[in-house]
Amino acid sequence: AFVVTDNCIRCKYTDCVAVCPAEAFFEGPNFLVINPDDCIDCDLCPVECPAGAIYQENDVPENQKEFIQLNADLAKVWPRITEVKAAPIDADEWDGIENKLKYLDV
Ligand code: SF4
Ligand code: F3S
């Protein structure tokens, strides 16, 4: 499955959901996750993300491995999102900031 990682936090552009044929995305207040049980590994979403936040689970950077389990866990409690919506107004300011996990709202 594919995994949403750190740089999505507070960016949340949602371009990813527009291309997902499996409706595998779930939405929290400032982050999206992919349900690994829904993802069919089509590889369409990574290039759509302006923040470059999506990786195949085998390619998730070493320091972000915890996002694999986090996606699975949060997908169980957050609602599904299937349509693009406006990003936070300050999304571009947060793009590229490292270690945003401490800002994750659940
Ligand atoms: Fe959806 Fe494909 Fe991305 Fe999986 S890899 S989340 S199926 S767009
Ligand atoms: Fe997040 Fe990128 Fe989607 S910032 S909401 S994974 S387009």
Image: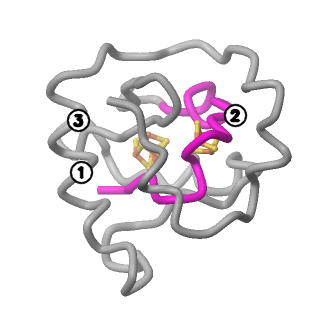
- Residue 48, percent across and down? 70, 46
Q: Is residue 16 magenta?
A: yes
State the count of labels.
Answer: 3
Q: Label 1, label 2: how many angstroms apart (C-alpha)?
A: 19 Å
Q: Position of residue 89 (x, y in %)?
A: 82, 25
Pointer 1 and pointer 2: residues touching (CB < 8 Å)? no
In the orientation shown, which residue stands out farthest toward the front?
102
Q: Are marks 3 and 1 in contact (CB under 8 Å)?
A: yes
Q: Position of residue 44 (x, y in %)?
A: 57, 49
Query: In the figure, 22 relative to 35: above or below?
Result: above
Spatial CA distance of label 3 from label 2 is 18 Å
What residue is disc 2 on? Answer: 13
Q: Which residues are magenta?
A: 1-20
Q: In this rendering, is residue 103 above or below 2?
A: above
Q: CA distance from mark 3 to mark 1?
A: 6 Å
Q: Residue at x 31, y 46 (%)?
A: 40
Residue at 50 percent of width and 33 percent of height = 20
- 49 on left or right of 104: right
What residue is disc 3 on? Answer: 74
Mark 2 surroundings: few (<14), some (14-19) or many (≥20) residues within 10 A: many
Residue at left offset 75%, top offset 17%? 86
SS state under label 3: helix
Q: Residues within 10 Å of mark 1 (few under 14, many from 20)?
A: some
User: Is 95 colored magenta in this rendering?
Assistant: no
* Amino acid type, callout 1: Leu
The amino acid marked with disc number 3 is Leu
